[in-house]
Image (tube, rainbow, N blue to C red):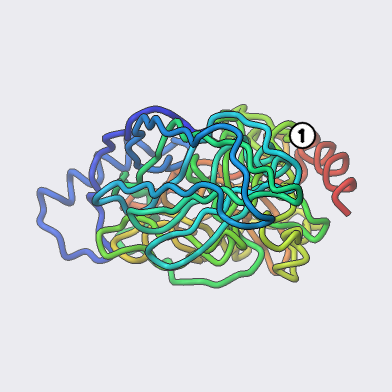
Amino acid sequence: MLNPSSPSRLPGRAIGRTVGRTVGRWFAAVAIAAAFGASAQTVPLSHVAHDYAYRSPDGLTAPQASVAASHDVRIEGAAWLRLQFDPMQLPEGAVLRMTSLQDGAQQHLDAARLQQWQYTSAYFNGPALRVELLAGARGQAGQFGITKVIAGAPGEQPESQCGPTDDRVSSDAVDRARLLNIGCTANLMRQGCFITAGHCLSTQSLVNVVEFNVPKSNANGSLNHPAPKDQYAPNVATRKFTDGGIGNDWGVFVVFPNSETGLMPLEAQGHGLKLARDVPLVGDKVKVTGYGLDDGVDNQTQQISNGPITSVDTNSTTLRYQADTEGGNSGSAVLAGARVVAIHTHAGCTLNGGANQGTLFTHAGFKSAFKALCKSAE
């Protein structure tokens, strides 16, 4: 279900991409980075939750697949909208059709898909959304109600980068996804399942939507979303995870078929990642791709960074590396060569150095959960 809390007021960003800041702001940035140095790197969506009381008339009928009821939702100034519906059982064949009045993106949910989406909608760009109730084969449309509207707003959080410059660059890997509304990164595996950080899955109400092909954000950093054909509802009841801190933080989950295409992510994206066979060595280069915080249009869009491994601890199943990450990178796959050697979970870098941290793929609990859940996804 949607998180009903009002938006968090998080500290503003203090660290820029270059060293060109005043001395005062530089010291402030160091202090913030140090304070968040060992923190998990999630970035929950900044939003405002509006209570909403709309219910269509009961017992509506109409010719097959025609509109029996229509309602426009508008929240002025919102970057995006998402709806919470009153739990309902639509008649056979009846469908809720939602259309963004900004870009025309649509989602269609029948009774089964409404349940899979936990009676919520996908994310839609813009401040206005049209909801239409389409009658089924027998002309019966039933009824729908909207109880809450979640409206997107800009939000910021401190960075944690390795050294004085942010070396991330835009990326377009087809097998990396943005996990909302917890604000993490999820990785599509060749078996069709996903891996991420355990703390990204620990609060079920925040594990809502997996997004591929994420567009650039707005100039003020507020998020844009792909069309519903690139959004998937996680099957939260089957997720497996441990949120046990550095070296013991991992998660595995699967999703339902897409509401618009009927495809699973691997069918739609065409590629998935593979786990490593061998433990990497200190000095090996790694790549980290994820949806971390940034300025303007790059905020929580896909970016990649790379750097050397600084520490490999097989006893605590912890990998440390100097590749830039920010809030929202939690769950990012850490690749050595073309294979996953770790799941990024915690910050650790500062302007003076340090290292970011993840759970090695050799973690026994992770390997067991991966085998159990991902085998079933093949």
Q: Position of residue 236 (x, y in %)?
A: 69, 35
Quick one: quadrant of the N terminus?
top right
Q: Quadrant of residue 175?
A: bottom right
Quick one: quadrant of the C terminus?
bottom right
285 relative to 319, above or below: below
Residue 310 visible:
no
203 relative to 356, above or below: above
Q: Position of residue 260 (x, y in %)?
A: 66, 60
Q: Is residue 350 left or right of residue 68?
A: left
Badge 1: how crowded within 10 Å, few (<14), some, or many (20+)? few
**Residue occupying the point 61% across, 57% down:** 66
**264 and 343: which one is in front?**
264
Q: Amino acid at mark 1?
A: Thr
**Where does label 1 land, which residue?**
238
Q: Is residue 249 left or right of residue 219?
A: right
Secondary structure at badge 1 equals: helix
Q: Position of residue 149 (x, y in %)?
A: 40, 38
**Residue occupying the point 89% across, 48% down:** 375
Residue 38 visible:
yes
